[in-house]
Image (tube, grey):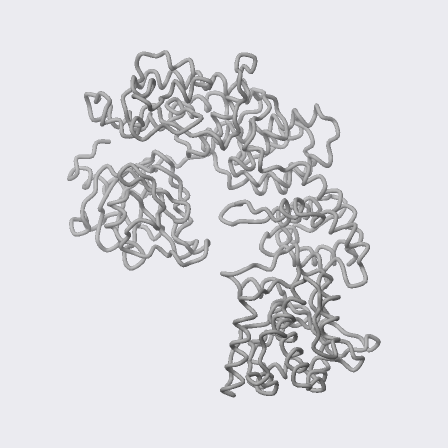
Amino acid sequence: MDAGARRINDIFNGSRVLEIPFFQRAYVWGEEQWERLLEDINTVSQSNKPYFMGSVILKQQQTNTQGGYGDIRTVIDGQQRLTTLSILLNVLCLKTDQMSKFNKRFRLDDDTTVIKHNHNDISAYTYIMNLESETDVDKKDNVTEAYTYFKSNLNPLKANFDAITNHILLVVIDLNVDEDEQEIFDTINSLGVKLTTAELLKNFFFGRDDIQQYEKFWKKLFENDEETKEYWDKEITTGRHKRSFIDIFFHSYLQIKINDSSLSVKTEDKIQLSKVDKLFESYKRFIKDYCNGQHDKLLGEIRKYALSFKATFDPDVVDVELPAKPCIERINAIIFGLETTTLIPYILFVENNITDNITKSELYGFIEAFVMRRMLDRATTKNYNQLFTDRLILNNALSKQDFLDYLQKQDDKANYLPSDSQLENAMKTNVLTNKQATGVLYLIESSIRDRSRHSTQLLGLNKYSLEHVMPKKWQNHWAKPDTQQKIVERDRKLLTLGNLTIITQALNASIRDADWDVKKAGRGNVPGLKKYAEGIDTFSDYLAKDVWNEDVIEERAMFLLSKALEVWEVPYQATIITEYVNENWNGEYYISYGVGQERTWEDALKYGFVSAGGGTWYSRTLSILEIGSRVWVNIPGEGYVGVGMVMDVAKPTRDVKIMVDGQEKDFHELPLTANYHRDLPQDKCEYVVCVDWIKTVKQSEAVKERGFFGNQNSAARPTADSWNFTIKKPKELWGILD
């Protein structure tokens, strides 16, 4: 790679071909960009001083003596800028009768243009470049519009061809033939538009002479009409990143191929070829090493899998009623409604390899039971990527029994299937995220719902709100337990599923924290649960209860358990007892809360949160925090300043909502005293965990002693002997009971 400042005369030298990938998207610049460029051109012409005008990425192409051109470079980035400059200079030379100067720079020896344009713009661009005089052109494409704009607005007395071509500078990055253009582009444009895998693959698969293949194997699949393009361009969140459907498809298809036993892909190659951020390079390497360099062999199968993908995966399923029985719609709800996108490669594999609908339905029922039981038991999903993109495909698991057999052969039990007794404990005690709890309740509801006695359909998953029957702020209107221990137990139990219900509309804030009778019936013109939950079979019978307390919450938890065991029934012998838990850990978390310009304890104390950011190393450990768990906060160098209960999972600041005086506000709308890395990209931004403080002190009153526990991670599960010694002191000072 070589990078440096280049004049227009250096870039356009009359002998170098600048080839815009033939199937690149069209020229899109408009009047705003044209006007700005024209102002820059006039400034340079008057000042005769160097003027920087952005960057361009070019990649050297292999040439041969029979091709006629000795220097061919692909325009990786800069299509819009180079196209516009060439049109503007063409118009200037037409106005000043200097076409010989223009042709010396912008035409080759065979009289063709230096820029070889993409299939969308080549006709219009060639026509404009071949004009011999200023003339009106009656076409509506953007290239012609640019020509018309400069024809009308460029003043030849203010623009000088020699000054422009000698003094306008572009930062040109020249890549060698074997360098990774996607990595370079994405690094330079980390805050802008990414060079998508799909764009790179399209131009890798098809050249200027492959129009028919392009039409059959790409355009009709991915660009046939606006509805098709909208589907494939749709972005969803996968992990911490947003990815388009078309990128997810190509990644899923490649994972299926590298686990095809007939290709004998090496283990070390699989590791490299499975990386999401290197997908284009992975395709090139896979085709070179395992397809004899012939991508044509893949196109037919890609077409088959792409049609299957579009027919299978529907993110809009969360807006409509789900069928009661196992099916692809319910799997879609789990994938898109509960953000379990790691299932996609395996589901695509299943859809293309199982033709018997009964076998497929049984397998989908077991996948749902597997995922939802583990969600209830708060089992880790860290192994799902390996399980659903690698192991099940490699082992050709194409039935419920195949899936079961695979699980039972594993020694590490990381992908254990929770037993009925584990599910009972989970239903009584575990605290899920709001999204998870809504999903659990909705999937049970959609399965047990007696549709014969309801006049209206169940709404879609995303149409329901989650309500805490006994509110988290129960102290305002509910009777207080007689001991501190019972208060702690209530605060924990009200976060469990027995106290949660889905309702058709969120309750008005004026009754959300009201007592049981008001919350049921409403007040005045404000409806209560009887209006918004009476059609919900997982809750409606409980509207007849005279009281709502811890005993009723447990009773309903057992009701939900009985329904969950019906919906997610699995063979008894399939369940595997739980993962290893470190016995030295007391279940409470340590938080290292660094203060400074990026965050303050004043904000965290006032609005109820802890946070970390500046890079994934700092924010990643926040993901271990479990809702409902207790956290102890230490400011490094100062001491322990607070203890509280985790209320939500870690989220980037842009997704965080904070309740202030009964109103929900975006995190960055708050009058914060620090920056919280608000200008950094997602992988470096601040992540926030909402906390309900039990006790806090000012930073100046921090509790600190020699020998107190400390850790460099933002969050930790302490197992050191010093941990119990550490928290004993603030417990005594702050009156915190175990």
Residue 94, quarter of picture: bottom right
Left or right, residue 134 beside residue 45: right
Q: Quadrant of the C terminus?
A: top left
Residue 591 screen position, x and y as percent: 31, 46
Left or right, residue 390 beside residue 723: right
Name the residue: 52% across, 88% down.
Answer: 48
17 and 427: which is toward the camera: 17
Residue 361 screen position, x and y as percent: 66, 25
Q: How many marks?
A: 0
216 and 367: which is toward the camera: 216
Residue 606, quarter of picture: top left
Name the residue: 71% across, 74% down.
Answer: 135
Residue 712 screen position, x and y as percent: 34, 53
Q: Is residue 394 visible?
A: no
Residue 124, quarter of picture: bottom right
Q: Is residue 422 visible?
A: yes
From this viewpoint, which residue is outermost toward the right? 66
- Residue 168 higher or lower than 117, as above or below: below
Q: Quadrant of the N terminus?
A: bottom right
Left or right, residue 66 beside residue 355: right
Residue 63 screen position, x and y as percent: 77, 74
